[in-house]
Amino acid sequence: MSRAVKAFLLSAFVFPGLGQLYNGNLKKGVICVLAATFGFSILLLLGIFYLWMEYAPIYPAPPTPELRTQIILNVLRRPSLFLTAAGLVGLWVYSALDAVRGSKAPLPEEA
């Protein structure tokens, strides 16, 4: 398997930035990993916050399937949640494509 394919698979299917780290581009790889970790953390916190904001006013009521569906749909309609998820997808695509592009450059010890 070529270096470009391995770098792509690491960044596309494991975690953004691992392909850059595999290619030896440590600065870009660390930045991508940290940005993805930060983005996932923000997405998780926003999701928990919005779920609480939707369920808190009706808290004593038992969560029926219809109520759960309505709460989840209301949470998914929030623009900040959608924009954060879109940013993460963009970072993931950029990381995978950049890993392929970076694999064509000579390794630091080969230069």
Image: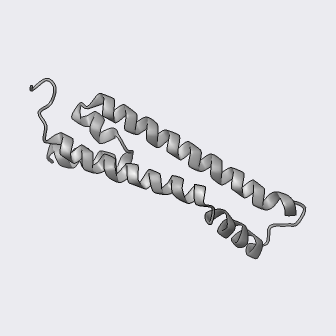
Query: Residue placed at 77% from the left, 56% from the top?
Result: 53
How far from the left and from the top, in percent, is residue 60?
90, 61
How far from the left and from the top, in percent, is residue 95?
32, 46
Q: Quadrant of residue 34?
A: top left
Query: Residue placed at 47% from the left, 57% from the top?
Result: 86
Number of marks drawn: 0
Query: Going by the image, does 68 lie left or right of 1?
Result: right
Query: Residue placed at 64% from the left, 50% from the top?
Result: 46
State whether residue 85 is above or below residue 4.
below
State whether residue 70 is above or below residue 110.
below
Q: Residue furthest top?
A: 109
In this view, the residue in front, 38 or 2, is 38
Q: How is the image coloured?
A: one colour
Q: Residue furthest left?
A: 111
Query: Going by the image, does 102 lie left or right of 52?
Result: left
Query: Going by the image, does 65 lie left or right of 103?
Result: right
How far from the left and from the top, in percent, is residue 88?
45, 51
How far from the left and from the top, in percent, is residue 92?
38, 50
Q: Quadrant of residue 7?
A: top left
Q: Residue furthest bottom?
A: 66
Query: Residue placed at 9% from the left, 25% from the top?
Result: 111
In this view, the residue in front, 62 or 33, is 33
